[in-house]
Image: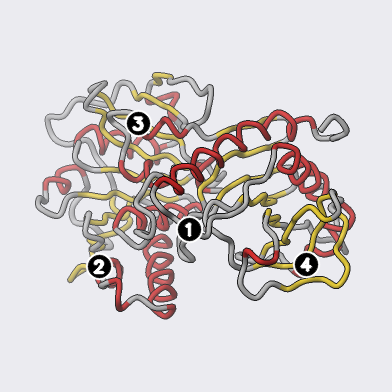
Amino acid sequence: MTDLAYAAARSAAPAIHSHLVHHRDHGLARGETGLASLPPDAAIARMIDAAFWASLRREEGYEPRISLAYLEPGETTHPLVFEHALALDPATLARVAPAVERPGVHLGVWPIDGVLRVWGVARAIPRYGCVVEVAEPGLLVVKHHRGDELAKFTNVAVLQGDQVRVVDEHASHQADCPSILSSMLGFEKPGAWGSSLHVLVQLAVSMRAHRRGGLLLVVPESTTAWGDSVVHPSMYAVTPPYTELAALAVLPQVMRQRTWRDELGRAVDAVAGLTAVDGAAVLTAGYALLTFGAKIVRRHGAAPLEHVLVTEPIVGGAATVLTPAQLGGTRHLAAGQFVHDQRDAVALTASQDGRFTIFAWSPVRSMVHAHRVETLLL
């Protein structure tokens, strides 16, 4: 790896390899089969290096969007195999990028005669398959596949310039870790995608993707106490509640087909779009939409928000305690105050710049805990 021009590739590869080994070993212990081949450190670093420099190029004025997957043709269904394998270099990747820029399409990478080369195109990736994706120029995401077509890949590391952020899987072991964060980190029962927690993850991804900023409040079904923390009447109250997302989320597994996946995706995008309206969308834990554009106020008699614990689930990340003035814009302040007053609720907050924060009450610290999770959503 000493000949790599992108130094961050060398520093990130060992941690990524350890992550893949950990998950693959756990999969084998559970009796899972058809698992992806494990790339060595050098292969991971080489893929990152080639993808990084390719991301800085332009092909006919377009920025390359590339996804590299480490697998051989026999590990995927219906592989598109080139007669002559391509070199794994920035110029070649930039030229072929227009053919594979759509989501779910990957360039297959495998050693051929001892040298990593691009053998063709793959759409199906085996569980724990290593993928290096160009998110934007100079920004790469390394992830592994969960093994479910609908499931979001689990992010392992994010590299931007000389910054390397490796996801800290131990963050899910904290006593006050929200269930949605554990799901983003990839600690869930295999094949359970489509459950309530995973629908929340899809909502978070969609909220971040529309780049308009947004706020989603997830409240218990069994109480209307959340109404004490919003202005009444709400201009955009929904009567009766919008329940398409709720109905799709609980559809029995035997009835779930590709049309169900498409319908669920459209319903998720519909709700996520409403979060961009000034104010907050309110969703029950059972996925019934109650209102959107709601204005948050401090509950009568409640104390004002004074401090917020802020963490990011990355290796080496330090917890900080911030005042409301340091927290961010009015959307973040409103989300923090809402969770401070309604401690059985969770607030999902998207910024226009791509930042994403989950606000939840920490019973351990007795304060609002803001989890920065954009690293997991790229």
Q: Give how far across and how far down residue 272 sits, in percent.
A: 41, 60
Q: Residue at x 57, y 34 (%)?
A: 18
**Alpha carbon separation for disc pair 1 and 4:** 33 Å
Quick check: 378 left or right of 190? right
Front: mark 2 or 1: 1
Mark 4 or 3, nearer chain start: 4
Q: Residue at x 26, y 28 (%)?
A: 362
**Alpha carbon separation for disc pair 2 and 1:** 28 Å
Amino acid carrying label 1: it is Thr
**Alpha carbon separation for disc pair 1 and 3:** 26 Å
Residue pointed to by mark 1: 33
Q: Give how far across and how far down residue 192 sits, in percent.
A: 34, 59
Amino acid carrying label 3: it is His
Q: Residues within 10 Å of mark 2 (few under 14, many from 20)?
A: few
The quadrant the N terminus occupies is top right
Residue pointed to by mark 4: 98
Mark 1 or 4, nearer chain start: 1
Residue pointed to by mark 2: 250
Mark 4 or 2, nearer chain start: 4
Amino acid carrying label 4: it is Pro
| Quadrant in the rendering for residue 69 | bottom right
Quick check: 353 left or right of 73? left
Residue pointed to by mark 3: 173
Q: What secondary structure is marked by label 3?
A: helix
Q: What secondary structure is marked by label 4?
A: helix
